[in-house]
Amino acid sequence: MNLIQQRSDILVFENAHLVAELNLKQGGRILTLRPAVGGENLIEGLAHQLQVSRQTVNLNDGEGRVYRVSAPSALQRDGVTVGQQITVEFDVPLLAEGTLTIKRLYTLYADAGALRWVDTWHTDRSLHGLRYSDLISVKLLHAGGAKVVDFFTCSDQSNERVSCKDAEAENVAGLFTHDGNAGIFCYREGPCPDSQPVPTDFDFAYDKTQQQVSMVGLGFDRLHPGAPRRANGVVIGVLENAESLRGLKRYQLSRYPLQNTERIEYLTNSWPAYFLKIDETKILDELDAAAESGMDTVYIDDGWFDIFMGDVDLERFPRGFAPIAERAKDLGLQVGLWMNPLGLDSRHPEAKIWDGAEGHDTNIEGNPWNWVARSTNYTPVEKIFSEGTRIYVGMDLLNPGYAAHIRKKVIDLYTQFGFKRFKFDLYQQNEYNTLLGDVHEHFEAYRALLEDLKQEIPELMISMDVTRTNRPGFDFAMDYGRLFLENRGRRLKDHRYYQPYTALGNLWRLAKYMPAHRCELEMMPQVEEYPLEYIVGTTLFAHPLYWGSQTDMGKEKRKHLKAFKETLAPHKERILNQWVFPFGDAPGLNTWSGLLSVDPDLNRGYVAVYRNGGDEGAHVFRLPQEAGEHALQNVFKPEETVQNKEGFAEFEIPEPFGFRLYAFNEG
């Protein structure tokens, strides 16, 4: 595989979908970026402005930028080469004495028409005022319309977690698209705007008249000698289809594939049934019932410890986790465990607010504090009264003692009990400007912890709770696990109350912009108001998460659930290994909604349709272009077919709340 070549000062990236040429003497300025087959150039690089200590420095200025290039290296996954990477270092002399070095790692996947890069900044002098530096700045070479997409990352507060609108002069957004010619998309690989460690007032500056766009926001604001910083990543690629964002889907399937070591998992978590009142007997019963209903992983949620994030509570689990791990192994199940990776009980000696260090003169004695994440006022940056029963205090991951403690705690749970599934929850990161480092450094320390755990625990999968904001959920969390999308239940009398169509809507809205196979979607088949097939069907395009106690279902219903899961099994893995596109109405009461899964060759796939109440037993959908005009065969009743005529198809579902799955295969 030879995707990257250097021709004198020009770096060329080329695969079956994309050709891009960059001028290294001009700091990596993009000369061309076009579709590989018969495509015109879509963009060219403009002045790449760096805001450095009240100076504006142009990375692309002139023809004499000093650079160093490594040899291209293979990017492998499961022993297969899936792309290539290359590192380029650019030296940027500053107006004041000193040099800034930007070390840029470029990545091109073999099957994606998009170029990705991540910069790491190094300096030999302290720099400040960096946050509004450009990540990329380009001229759009074809007339067209521009849109921006923003993400709201707190599903506890709203189900409307994605907004798309026409681009303005300044935009708060994570994604920019332009539909001129083949179109381009520009995506910032970093925490969403409302979760940025160092926020900016805008993320994309767009000049409609001049057809220019700049993406800003490094994710940090200052830099010191000997302390390099990783900037937010940049992805720019060929859009292919402005309505479906096909090019973005192509990139995401390469960036976040289902790897050989991953499984399609049916998860179960008893939190809504028991809250903190769990014990050995209840969890053993959950394991037995989960095996009967065909689940794969049983989560033990909050409440398993003696004091918050302490040792196993031996009153509730008198034999520790050993019998639970043994029962799970016998049943062929995984056990997942809830954790707050940044908190300890206020009674823990390392979590004391005043631990004696306050009795020393900080400026004279250099007194060491305990593990508490402390502000410059020496008080905790995070102290939460949780669930009405305990107080936890935020810990500082930049403290080597705490970093070693939480690392060992997680790894010990794997080595002792075989636990490879964890749910990370409850923590916040936006307030972590501490005595030991700023919030960007804490985000990166968290990334380093996850990477370390990934290296130590084979098949590690972390369920990243994104029901609250100020976490890297839609960023690097997807490199280490999946996104836990919501907290729903039957006791909640607000927008979080569980309805199958509401949960489906959460996924439907995200599916256009995020990889659905990196999401976990709640289902409550134990409720009686809806057919089981409809409830489970709403989770078909994600990893289903049974929310509640398995024992809330009788044996017959558990048997029913397992049988339906087995019916879906040969289709579900294919569905999650393909592109997913939403269509129809956004799911809600009295709507008709749909999801399409199609392979990148567009010759086989699945169409799922949902009737979410209402009086009409039939509905005509306009299907996505990617569905082609194939005949659609009912997966459950192969003798039944639906004709897709010029992109329109009519589906019948007589029951008020129903789900149908159709397959198509060219030839």
Image (cartoon, helix red, strand yellow):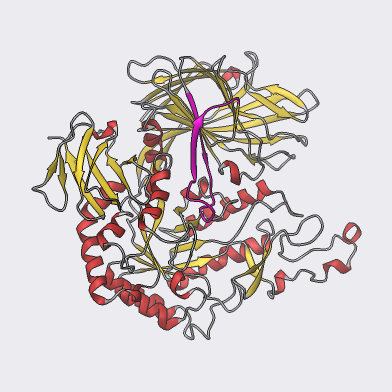
Residue 96: name its quadrant.
top right
Compared to residue 546, the image places residue 78 above or below, namely: above
Would residue 166 be visible to someone looking at this image? Answer: yes
Tell me the residue at 63%/36% (across/down): 218
Residue 581: name its quadrant.
top left
Tell me the residue at 71%/74% (across/down): 349
Q: Which is nearer the eye, 234 or 209?
A: 209
Which residues fall within the magenta stretch?
146-169
Would residue 515 be visible to someone looking at this image? Answer: no
Q: Which is nearer the eye, 135 or 225?
A: 135
Tell me the residue at 62%/52% (across/down): 445
Compared to residue 229, the image places residue 22 above or below, namely: above
Give the image location of residue 173, x and y in percent: 55, 36
Compared to residue 444, the image places residue 548 above or below, namely: below
Q: Which is nearer the eye, 281 or 357?
A: 281
Report the side of 212 relative to 384 (left or right).
left
Q: Quadrant of the N terminus?
A: top left
Q: Quadrant of the C terminus?
A: top left
- Magenta stretch: includes residue 642: no
Give the image location of residue 390, x and y in percent: 64, 74
Q: How many marks?
A: 0
Compared to residue 315, the image places residue 165 above or below, namely: above
Point out the residue furthest to the front here: 615
